[in-house]
Amino acid sequence: MQLTVITILLSLGMEKDNIEWFAIKKPREEGKIERAEVGGKKLCIVLLNGKLYATSSRCPHAGADLSLGWCEGEKLVCSYHRHRFDLQTGKGDEGQGNYIDVFPVKEENSRWYVGIKKSWWKRLLTK
Ligand code: FES
């Protein structure tokens, strides 16, 4: 019994297809931050140089809404205290010691999707 439970738990962590894809609107304006709420997450969606980015919208510094910020180059800037985050990696600028989550984005049949990792419980219940 214990071995079965451990096997199920390990397989949930190793499952390759544990991402759920949600349709999002592609922003019309380059460099403008759009808000989206999908899969229980609040996101920032940014179109920059023809590439689409999706990040978490909560600033890890003091919780501000990053969608109220702006883009500088390939960085997302928080409007509260100006912490900056790389749109590709989510990494905060040197000295900040923080990061934001970045999510995969894909285009299929002219529609855009963002990938959100399924929760542990959802993976367990849909096994
Ligand atoms: S809340 Fe974002 S930098 Fe302080």
Image: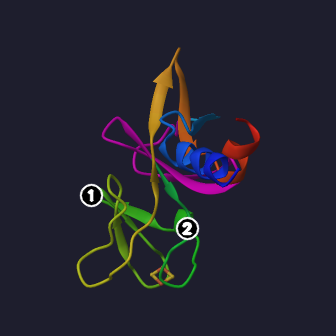
Q: Is residue 17 left or right of residue 47?
A: right
Image location of residue 69, percent across then percent down: 48, 68
**Front one among 67 and 103:** 103
Quarter of the image where the C terminus is located:
top right
Q: Marks 1 and 2: CB-CB under 8 Å?
A: no
Queried whether the magenta region covers residue 28, the answer comes back as yes
**Which amino acid lies under the numbered mark 2 shown in the image of this protein?**
Leu
The magenta stretch is 26-53
Residue denoted by label 2: 68
Earlier-in-chain disc, 1 versus 2: 2
**Which amino acid lies under the numbered mark 1 shown in the image of this protein?**
Gly
- The residues tagged by marks 1 and 2 sit, at their Cα atoms, a distance apart of 17 Å
Q: Is residue 16 left or right of residue 71?
A: right
* Residue lying at 23% horizontally and 78% vertically, measured from the top left: 94
Mark 1, Cα crowd under 10 Å, few <14 / some 14-19 / many 20+, is few
Which quadrant of the structure image shows residue 70?
bottom left
Task: Please tell me whether residue 81 is drawn above or below residue 126 in the rendered image.
Answer: below
Image location of residue 124, percent across then percent down: 70, 45
Which element type, helix, strand or loop, lies under badge 2? helix
* Residue lying at 47% horizontally and 52% vertically, measured from the top left: 32
Mark 2, Cα crowd under 10 Å, few <14 / some 14-19 / many 20+, is some
Image location of residue 117, percent across then percent down: 56, 46
Task: Please tell me whether residue 16 is drawn above or below residue 4 in the rendered image.
Answer: above
Which element type, helix, strand or loop, lies under badge 1? loop
* Residue lying at 58% horizontally and 55% vertically, measured from the top left: 43
Image location of residue 37, percent across then percent down: 68, 51
Residue denoted by label 1: 73
